[in-house]
Image: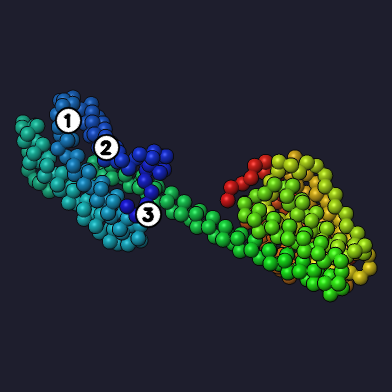
Amino acid sequence: MSKNTITLGELTGWKNYNNYRFLFHLALWLFYTFAFAYIYALFYESVTLQKSLAQYTLSVWIDVMATYLTVYFLIPKYLLRKKYLYFALLFFGAAIVFILMQRAVLLFITYPVLFPDYKKPESFIKFNYVFTFFNIYVMPAIFASVKLFEYWYMNQKRNQELEKEKMESELKFLKSQIHPHFLFNTLNNLYALTLDKSDKAPEVVVKLSDLLSYMLYECNAAEVPLEKEVQLLQDYLALEKIRYYDDLNINLDIQGRINRKYIAPLILLPFVENGFKHGLSKQIHHPWINITLNIEDYLLNFTVENNSPSEEKADLTGYTEGIGLKNVRRRLDLIYGNQHTLEIADEEGIFRIKLRIKLHPQPKEK
């Protein structure tokens, strides 16, 4: 069986379907034979159920051949490969053969054996072909409907898996870019301190080590506890305080309960980092940044405000904001979709980011 083929068992959850496939099909054909024989006997009072069963038993193997030839050969080999002309020619050619076979069984076996008093038709080829076609192709139509649904479901499932793999690959790529981007900025800060032979340099190394440990070893999950992301922000702000000494005014306000809530890792940090890199690092006098994290039930409201050079306007489309902010925009779209909103504004020397995310009470699986 092809690795791209699914079975009725996979669709219904019946794990042992393949082990009992033959018995399942046999039971289906027995039911089909009995049901049509019973209906035939009801319409023709002169025909007993026993004779009706015998009549359908003699001809049901033609229905079986038509079914499996159509469903397991013609459809996958020609119809699904869009070879429509070949499919039509072979399908109708096979249908004519099966119709004539049923006609032969009826005239040379069924009538002589079961209905010897029945007047034999004068012509072998003069009969209702359309009626015989529908008589034979009831089960092929049912089987084909189920099989086509299986193929449709298989394609849908495969497309979803491919889309999921694509998204996961893109997320991994975006996430891998965040690490070196953050590291590059922080090492620049450390380099500046070492040039000044600052006593703060060893402290920066220790805090940077803690941050990288978290980012490298604890951010591999799809979601992490919100408390850890908040701690990451606090550690990052501590690093920036060391860099700016007393020249930087940092306000971090956390409102609401942050425990038992989960968020995608490294979602909040790039917004804060963006404020320092593209705003405060270009200020000369009295840089400040206000960060507010407010939790209402499972709705996170995150705001970052900082003063920015009045002569430099931000690109609110997000395409020249720098790699960190662009990446986090894309990650938000991939992970949260319509469960988040992001607003970015630059008004009169104040750069503002407002983010709303619907959090989860349990970590989401990858």
Residue 228 visible in the current orientation: yes
Q: Which residue is mark 1?
A: 52
Looking at the image, residue 199 sits to the left or right of residue 267; the answer is right
Figure quadrant of residue 24? top left
Q: How is the image coloured?
A: rainbow
Above or below: residue 267 compared with residue 16: below
Q: Which residue is mark 2?
A: 23
* Helix, strand or loop for disc 1: helix
Judging depth in this view, the residue of 74 and 102 nearest the camera is: 74
Q: Earlier in the sequence, mark 1 or mark 3?
A: 3
Residue 170 percent location from the top left of the image: 59, 62
Above or below: residue 52 compared with residue 127: above
**Callout 1 amino acid:** Ser
The residue shown at (80%, 49%) is 293
Q: Which residue is mark 3?
A: 3
Residue 66 percent location from the top left of the image: 23, 47
Looking at the image, residue 249 sits to the left or right of residue 23; the answer is right
Figure quadrant of residue 205? bottom right
Q: Residues within 10 Å of mark 1 (few under 14, many from 20)?
A: many
The residue shown at (62%, 55%) is 220
* Helix, strand or loop for disc 3: loop
The residue shown at (82%, 44%) is 255
Looking at the image, residue 276 sits to the left or right of residue 84; the answer is right
**Callout 3 amino acid:** Lys
Q: Which label sits in the foreground, 1 or 2? A: 2
Q: Residues within 10 Å of mark 3 (few under 14, many from 20)?
A: few
In space, the residues marked 2 and 3 are separated at their CA atoms by: 23 Å
Looking at the image, residue 54 sits to the left or right of residue 142; the answer is left
Q: Earlier in the sequence, mark 1 or mark 2?
A: 2
The residue shown at (27%, 54%) is 73
In space, the residues marked 1 and 2 are separated at their CA atoms by: 24 Å
